[in-house]
Structures are given as structure tokens and as C-alpha cells.
Amino acid sequence: MSTRFSVNGRTVDAKAEADTPLLWVIRDEIGLTGTKFGCGAALCGACTVHVDGQPVRSCQTPLSAVAGRKVSTIESLPRNNTHPLQKAWIAHDVPQCGYCQSGQLMSAAALLSHNKNPSDADIDAAMSGNICRCGTYARIKAAIKTAAAEMRGARSQA
Amino acid sequence: MSTTTTTRGGLSRRGFLQTSAVAGGGLAIGANLAGLSVEALAAGTIHTPNAWVHIADDNTITLISARSEMGQGVYTSMPMLIAEELNVDLRTVQVVIAPPGKEYVNSLLGAQITGGSTSVRDAWEKLRVAGAQVREMLVSAAAARWNVDPATLTAANGKVTGPGGKSATYGQLAADAAKLPVPEKPPLKDPSKFAIVGKRTKRLDTPSKVNGTAEYGIDVKLPGMLYASIEQCPVIGGKVDSFDGAAAKAMPGVVDVVQLPDGVAVVADTYWHAFKARKALTVRWNEGPGASLTTAQMAESNRDAATKSKVIVIKANGDVDAAMKGAVKVVKAEYTLPLLSHAPLEPMNFTAHVANGKALLIGPTQFQQGAEGVVAATLGMKPEDITIKTTFLGGGFGRRLELDFIAQAALVSKAVGKPVKVLWTREDDMTHDFYRPMALNQLEAGLDAQGKPVAMRFKVTSQSVTQRAFGLPADTLDPFMAEAAVAPYQIAASKHDLVIHDAGMRVGYWRAVSHNMNAFANESFIDECAAAAGQDPVKYRLALLDGQPRFANVLRMASEKSGWATPVAGRSRGVALMEGYDTYMAQVAEISMQGGVPVVHKVTIVADLGRMVNPDTVEAQIQSSIVFGLTAALFGEITVDKGRIQETNFDRYRLMRMNEAPVIDITLVQSSEKPGGIGEPATALIGPAVANAVFAATGKRVRRMPFTAETIASA
């Protein structure tokens, strides 16, 4: 028994039991450790990944729920940090301990995928499920705006 | 206070297990450093008394950080100090974390510890001297090679150059330089010449933290590694009486079930298998003396101790009784703080491989020397057989000064003879913390006819972390408990007392430690005195700050920056002032009351911390501390019933979220004073600033945290 789905564009057949949370399949079986474990109860957002483009908490998503679907993790962003969000995170030096930042980036990416000009309220609404114990919220908000501006610029040039 | 620093160093050193310098054991950090280790750098390393600087033949420069990176930016600020004197571009250097070693001891704490906002204060001289030593050795090596006067040579941009176009890279000189004696007192740059230190500098660790490659403890993987989930006694301090692991052992992937003193570990091929099988354990506990503990009982015993237990004098000045009798008005107030959990976002974990008389331990720790010591003590091994490697820490805040989870990993790995990663759940983490102690602060002041305080009594009753962690003898002043106890205000007669009382819960150092209770009390109380005197809180404080220019300056500046003199409709402001970690700080919180609780809109901070290494990181630490301190002030409370912690996850132990975070306006005072610490102080000051703003808004004095609607309504 295995579960077939795609991770960052690659097809995988996961051997874990169907009720295993996606988080642990991604981390321990597939070996992508950028997605983090924070609470195990969908309260902190550290484990945020995309399933078919929607942000979900992978600690509360059983493997069976992603059969045949497309999962994207922090590793789907370029390793050389060229995504507008990664560039903005570096420009604002957002991370402190950095542990929550994969989840923060995935929530931000989901927001910007459908809203290239988010207001403060839009950002609050999209990001308040992600806890940062180091309190980097002000920089996250600024970085999202910077990335959004770049993405708008890129689109208008295209 | 320099005397406090001395005492801390002295008492800290006593309790630590002796360690010898271990050559090797560092762990590479960051994606670009994969495979790099201190062992691999042995050849060509220039070893100074305080740091290792490795310069490879290809001129790659590797600097060793003696402090753990837990978000505070030391993997950038520590190399900045070395790079400044070595005259190299910071972007060309790599950073590795130090293994346990005498040369890495934090002089302010007497052990190899990351904490107490000490990293820059400890390293400020040391690492610049180390960089200068290496620079001088490279110049001497070049002078000898070219047979010229070293004074004619320049070391800059990774090269030594001299007359007649002579030039050699540091890499070409490193092997020769490593053989030279280390100069004791190399010349240091005048700060006016600094090219790196004091400049806003991008963190070296950020790139690895935005693409998922930064390695935390939870990410460590060793060949053949197993995973362990541990059922710990629900009452901290309790022991396993007996257990039945048969059902757990029969579950998929389970390799073994291991009894530990305080719990039962299920070891399996994956974390999820271990976690699931753990639920199938049946454990009988000997819950021990903590099994009846309740929050109410702890608070009551603390209050009882405040009147009955022995008093330790922190500071006594003048005849308080006489001055109090002469006062026109007496102001009295009590302030209380609850237990708190550290709640770093990365739950406790460590990976161990104990085999063939050797132990390898990899994970997130603030205390490498302690990690080595606890493994030595737990397994009966010699330090030279133990290797400690430090990963990135997914938050520390004091929790990772503790060694409980490291000992667990060592024991489980030894029992199964394989590499094992022990990983706690959030519930494990929150219910088995070393909690910020409860505190009761009792203050009394006598005011003269003008409303000026002429007499003051201050008593803090709380639990000593230092007694538990480092064996501080009973009835001895715990210097950490006296932090911020003595406020800067001129009062002719005053007495400051400490009562140490063990309320029965395991306690630990929590960000800003006792600044939290003492600054909350002092800064709320001086506001109460100002109100009793019918005076403006800023003006009242300023009048008591003669001869305290750094305090007066940050207070004046915060007043101006916040628009203190210009009210905003619907908003109320509160101010607070403190020195902590050699940093002088004033904060103004601007709030409105909504649904009976304060909503904090804006916080204005002015900080004078002397010379700064990386001002951007300084600001980040203040931003961080405000959110951390507000989380405690508005939401934070750990409660106990029948010895069990009642808050088990972020639903009942709320952490501040983005939509609740205020605008934070920071001004840093330019100063040539010696550096102060900045990882913690702002944490302690935001609570009283908000409490004073609540008073301004409602006329109610909220004297206990958290500031919930119930607490404020009943104030």
C-alpha cells in the first residue's frame, strides 16, 4: 500500500500508513525538512504547505487526503533565493531564529498568488494563523509588501 | 552594576562541571557550509586564546562562533567583531559553531552559555583582540617571508601588501602565521575607523532561513537513526513506578520501549510510529510530592513566605522608618506575576549516538558545557569521549539552558545502541518546562508635602532559579533575583529586600528573568506615586533623575518621540523606564480600551546601549522583545492543578499574532559607552508601560499579569 501524490512537481509513492500526517511523510520519509513541526494541532502554522495551491497545515492533513494531489513545500521556492518573497525576506532581514519562517513564507506565497496588492488587513487575515515566537511580524508585513510590489512590477513589464 | 557581574561569574563557575578544551566537534551551519566542520579545519587554523580563525589556502576564512544562534544574530555579530580587526569583507567569511571548550567560556557567566544578553558584551574586547592577533601574525609572517619591517606592511581585504608591490593573500600566509607566537596586546582600531562594527549589516544566516535549508535540531538525521517519543510523568518530578509496554511494542515500526527515570520512551523507525505507539503505553507513576500542587496554593505559600521567611537585603540606604514617619502621604501596592512557559516554536529535541564508549550529541542548546557535563554524569563517561554539536536553535529564551532532554537522548540511544532522535510534542514541551517563577512584589513609599518620595520599602518574594540550577546556597542573595529591583529614582531612605521561597514548581530563567517582576513593580509604583502626587508621570520621574543623564535622556527622548505632550483622541499612554544588561531604555505604550482589555496600537522605544555591533539586529531584538513581553502582559499564564500544568498548547497559552502586534517605533541613542545587552530588556518594560496606559485610560491600576478583562474589571 502506498499513496501517490506530487511534491514540488515530483511524483512520490509514500509508504506511510494513510492516517500519517502529511508533515511527517514530507519530513521523515521524503526527507524535505524545511517544513517544521510546532504544535501538532494546526495552531501555529509552522507546518504550512500548499495542496493544489491552497495553504494547509500539514500536521493535521492525513496522507490519504493528498492522494493524487499536488503538494508544494518551502523547497519549491528556488534554492538560490530568487523568488520575490525570498528576496524581500533577505532585504528586510526578517528571520530571527527562523523556525517558523518556512510556514510564514508559504502562507505569504499563497496570499500573493491571488492578491498582488494586499492591504494591511489582507496581510493580517492571511498571516495571523502563523505564530512567530521571535515576533518578526513587522518585518514580515514589510517584506510581503516589498515582494508584492516586485511581483506587480514584473507583471506590468511582462 | 559591575559588582553584580562579578558575583554572577563567581557563583556560576562553582556549579559547573569542569570541561577540558575539546579539539573538534563543531558543526557547519547554513547550506553553503555543508560538510564543513572544525575537525576538517585543524590544519592551517590560527588559534588565539579567545577564538579560532581558519584561513584556507584558497583564502576562505572561517570564524568560530562561541555562542549559539537562537535568533539574536550572533552568527553575524560575532564574526563582525573579528572581521573588523582582521580587515576582511564579512561576506567572504564562513561561520561555524564552537564545540565545548575553555576558550569559549562566557566571562560574564563563567561558563560556555548563550544567555543573559551577554554575547556582545562578553565578546566586544575579546573578539576584536582575536582578530587583531590574527592580523598581526599574518603581517609578521609576511615580514619574515619578505625580510622587511612589519611596519611597512598593510593587512586589508584579505591580503598583506608592502613596498615594491609585494602582496600575499591571508591564505598564502596562514600556514606560516599559525607557527608564530600569539601577540598579547595587538593594537586595536580606534572606533572612529570601524568599517564593519556599528554598521547595519545583513545577517549571514538569513539565506538559509528562507529556503528551508537551515538545520535545526529537529532536522538532524544520522545513518540508521531511530525516533523516540517519551511519555513523561504528568507531575514534574514524578517517577515511573511500573509500566506495561507490550501493546506499544506490538505496534508498527516499534523497535523498543525504554524506561527512563522520569518517563517511558517508545523507540521506532519513524517519529509518527513512536508517537502513536506511545499512546498504547500503560504507566503507573509515583507522582511524588508535587502531585497536590495548585496555583492557588503556590500563590498563598508565596504570600505567606513574604511575611514569615528570612529576608535577604538587596540594598539598604538611610533610616527608612524615620523617613516614613515624616511622610505626608504613604502609598502602598502589591504586584503579582504568574508562572510562564518559554514556548520556543521548536519543541525540545536532541539526537544522540552512544556506542563503543563514545557519545555524539547533536541538537539545539544554549549551554554546550552543560550538555557535555550532563552526558558525562548520566552515562558515566569522560568528557573526551563526548562530542557535542550545536544546530540552529528554533528559539531559546532560556529553555535551552536546561539539559533534561539532552540526558534523555543520551539514555535512550545507549539503551538501544543506535542513533536516536528524541522529539517532544508541544504538549510535552509546555507541560514539562522550567517555568518563569511566580512573584509577589510589595512596595511602600512615603511622599513629602510636594509629593516627592522620601522613603521607600521594596520586597520581592519569588523562587530562585539559581538555587535549583547551580546550587546557590540557601539564604544567599541570588543576583538574578535582584535585577532591576533598585530603580534609578532619588529617594533619601530606601530598603530593598528579597525573600526566596520555593513554591513547589520547577523554575527556569525566562527572557529578561527578574527584570520582569521588578520593573513591573517599580515602574507601576512610581506611576502610582506620581498619581498620588497629582503629577505628570514623565515629569515626576525626571525630577527624580538628577545625576542620571542616560536615564533622563532616554526618558526625555521617548516623551518627545511618542508625542507625550500631545494627546490623541481615544488613545491613552503609559511610560516606563529601566536599566537592564547595561542598557538604558524608556518605552511609551499607546493604547485604547476595547472590550475591557487594552489594545496596544503603538510602542515608542528609546534605547541607549552604548556602542552597537549591528544596529539592525539591535532593532530586531527590541521588536522581538516587545512582542514577547506583550504576549506575557496580555495573555501569559501557566496554571497548575493536582500538580499538572493546565495549558498544553497554543489554544490555552496564547502567543501574540500578527493582527495583534503594535507599531513599534525605535530610536537608538548614538553613544560611545561600552556595549549593553539587547536580547532581553525591552521584554520587561512593555508590561508596566501598558499597565500605566490602562490607568491613564480607565483610572484602574492593574497590578497583576496577564491584563485580562476580569483582572482589569476587578482592579
Image: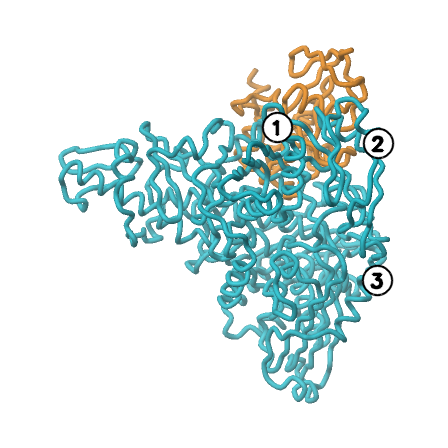
Could you tell me which quadrant the C terminus of chain B lies in? Answer: bottom right
Amino acid type at image mark 2:
Ala
Determine the image quadrant of residue B303: bottom right
Residue B693 in the image: state x and y as whole percent: 72, 61
Q: What residue appears at the point 60 percent right and 47 percent down from the top-left corner?
A: B377
Same subunit, labels 2 and 1: the answer reads no
Residue B569 sits in quarter: bottom right
Of the chain colours in the picture, the one used for chain A is: orange
Residue pointed to by mark 1: A148
In space, the residues marked 1 and 3 are separated at their CA atoms by 53 Å
User: Does residue A129 appear anywhere in the picture?
Assistant: no
Reply above or below: B292 against B239. below
Q: Are marks 1 and 3 in contact (CB under 8 Å)?
A: no
Q: Residues within 10 Å of mark 2 (few under 14, many from 20)?
A: some
Q: Residues within 10 Å of mark 3 (few under 14, many from 20)?
A: some
Q: Which numbered disc flags the more N-terminal residue, 2 or 3?
A: 2
Amino acid of disc 3: Gln
Q: Does residue B667 lie above or below B702 as drawn?
A: above
Task: Report the side of B175 relative to A4 (left or right).
Answer: left
Q: Residue at x 71, y 64 (%)?
A: B462
Question: Which chain is home to disc 3?
Answer: B
Instruction: State the separation of the CA atoms marked 2 and 1.
Output: 49 Å
Residue at the disc numbered 3: B297
Which chain is mark 2 on?
A: B
Chain in cyan, by letter, is B
Is A135 above or below relative to A73? below
In the rendered structure, find residue A119 and report the number of the disc placed on it.
none
Is the residue under label 1 in contact with that under label 2 (CB below 8 Å)? no
* Chain identity of mark 1: A
Residue that carries the numbered disc 2 in the rendered image: B280
Which residue is pictured at 68% across the width and 81% down the height? B447
